[in-house]
Amino acid sequence: MAGASKKPLVLDLIVFLIILSDSICTVAKAQNLQGNKNLQPRGLEYSGIYDLRRIDPALTGEGVKFGVICRSFTYVDDEPQNDYRPAIEHDCLRDTNFSFYDQGELQAGYSPHSTAVCSILFGEDPNAYHPLLGQFHYQGTSPQAQVEIYEFRHFLVNNVSCNIPPEVDIITADFGYPFEEWWTRGIESLVEHYGVIVVAGIGNGSDAYDSVLYPAAGANVIGVGLVNSVNNENPEINLAHFALAYPENSSFGPTVNGRCKPDIIAPGNCLAADVNSPKQYSPTGNWSSFSTPVVAGAIGMLVQKAKQEPDLSVAVLPKSGNCVIKAILLNSATKLPYWHKGRLKTDDDHIAPLDYIQGAGMLNAVGAYEHLVAGQQKPGKVSTIGWDLNQLDKKNNIECIYRFTLTEPADKYITATAVWNRHYGSVYPFEPLTEKDNNLRLELWAVDPNNPENSYILDFSDSPVDNTEHIYTVADAEYTDYEIIISMSDIDGNAREFMNQQYGLAWNFSPRQESDDILWYDLNADGIVNDSDLTIMLMNLLDSSKSPESYLIGDINPNGAIDVNDLKALWDHNNQQADW
C-alpha cells in the first residue's frame, strides 16, 4: 500500500518540476530580451515589436501560419525556376518551420530578396555577428511561426485563379505591379470572401519610378510604405534611428481612382540574412519590400494573441476579421511630423481619410496590442479604447453609436478608424461588384448630456472612394462626453438603397504628441539643422510653384504653402542636433 501511494506523488512531483522548468525558461527568455540592448533588426525595436514581446514574451508567432509569396528571378520557356526560395541553411533560418509548394522536387536556387524578407519575419540567431556591429542577438518578428513559401506564378494558378484561399492566417507580398489586373482583383476577392489578411509593399517612390503598386494599392489589402533610416555613415546609428516617409523612396497616393495609400508605414532598413553566407548579415537599405515584413510580423503577433484568447477570437473570424485587424493597426499608428489627411494644407480633410504618404502613420506594435486586448465592445457605453466587428443594416442598425467619457479632455486626441471590404466576383476575372459596395461615414460628436442642443460634430470622415474612414482630432476641453457614430454615407446628397455592410471599428484617446521633433527642421535627417536643410526647403518651395499638387515636406507652420514663416521657423532651430 505504501509503495502504491508513492507513485502518484512521484509523478506529480515530476509534472510540477517540468512546469516549473518551463516557467523558469520563459521568464529567463523574457529577462534576456529585456536586458539585451543588441537585438537586431533595430527597425523592430523602433516600431515597438521588441517592446511588445517584453510585455508578452509568448508572442513568438507560435500557432500562426504565414504565406510568403516570392518571385523567381529566372525563367526558362516562360516557366519560373526554383530560385524564389530563402536560403534556409542560414544560421537564423535553420530552425524555421518552412514548407514549399513544390516540396523540394526541384534543386533549390536561392533568392537574396526572399532570404532577407524571411529573416526579418522568422529569423532567430542568438550568436549573430557583424564586423562593424559586433555580436548581437538576431530575432525576427515571428520566429516560431509556420511558413508556407509560394512561388508567385504558381500561387496565381493554384490559388488566385481558382479563388481558393491558402491555409494560412497572413499573406505577405513584397513586390508589386503598377496596374490593376485580374490577379490583383483576385487577391482582393480572397480577402473579401475568406477574411485572409494580405500585406503588401506600396512601392519604392519617385527615385525608383514606382507609382503606388498593386496589390498594395488595392482596397482590401494593407499597403505598407517606408520610413527611411536617418542619414548617417555609422551603421549602428543608421540601423537604429529612423526619420520620415519621403516621396523619393516611398510611393504615395492617391491611387488612379483616388484612394488614399499607403495604409501604414514602417522602418525598412533592417539588418537581414545575407544569401551568400550562412553566418553573414547585411543592411537591406531603404526599400518597402523590407518594411512590409515588419508590419506583417506585427500582425502575426496580434493574430496569435487573438487565437489564444477566446474573448478576442472575433478579431480573426474568417468573415471580415481582416477589417478588425486593419482598423486596429491604423488606429494605433504613430503620427510623424508633417502628417496630414490628404495633402499638406491647413484645413482638416474630411474627404481623404489618410495622409497620402504616411497613411495612418507609423506602425506602433504596442499600441495595436493595447487596442486588441481592450476587447470587443458593442454599440452603447464603451471604454476609451477598444474595437468592434459589427454590421449596418436597413432593418435594425442604420447607424451604430459608441459613447465614452474623457475625464480630463484637455490636450487629448481622439482617434477612430472604420474599415470594411469592397466586393469582387469570386470567378475570373474577379470584376468589382460596385453595385454591392457601400460607403460609410464616420462622425465624432462632442455631447452635452444635459442640453442636447449644445452637442455638435467635432470631426467627420466621409470619403466617396475609400473603404477606410479615419478621424484624428483634438478633444474639446469643455466636453467630457463623446459619441462615435458610424452610418451609411450620403455624400452625394442622394441616399441610395444599400446592402447590409459589416465593418471593423477601433478607437482610443492619447495625449498630444511631441510637436518640437527635430525632424520638422532636419529635412535631410542627418542629425543637425543647418544650411543643407535650408537649401532643401528652398528647392521644395520652387517645386511647389511648379506643381501645386506635389507632396512637400517643409511647411512647418501649416498653411498649405512653404513661405517666410517656415524659413524663419527653420532658422530659429539652426544648429539643433539630434540626440543620436
Image (spheres, rainbow, N blue to C red):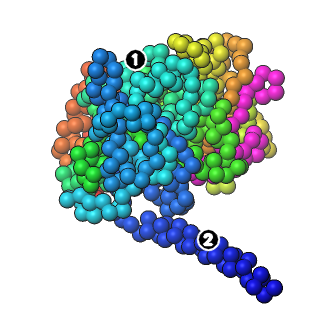
Classify residue 494 as left or right of residue 188: right
Residue at the (33%, 54%) spot, across then down:
91
Q: Disc 1 vs disc 2: Cβ atoms closer than 8 Å? A: no
- Tell me the residue that label 2 is attached to: 19
Write down the region rendered in magenta.
Answer: 369-398
Query: Can see residue 355?
Result: no
Which residue is drawn at the image coordinates 44% and 15% (left, top)?
181
Q: Residue at x 21, y 51 (%)?
A: 232
Q: Nearer the viewer, mark 1 or mark 2?
A: 2
Can you give x and y, in whole percent of width and height, for residue 529 in the image?
23, 49
Q: Quadrant of residue 247?
A: top left
What amino acid is at disc 1?
Answer: Phe
Circle 1 SS class: loop
Magenta stretch contains residue 395: yes
Nearest to N terminus: mark 1 or mark 2: 2
User: What residue is disc 1 on?
Assistant: 179
Name the kind of residue labelled 2 in the image. Answer: Ile
Of residue 317 and residue 567, the one placed in the foreground of this image is 317
Q: Quadrant of the C terminus?
A: bottom left
Return the x and y of residue 246 as percentages of the image width and height: 32, 36
Relative vertical location of residue 238 with respect to residue 418 in this rendering, above or below: below
User: Image quadrant for the N terminus?
Assistant: bottom right
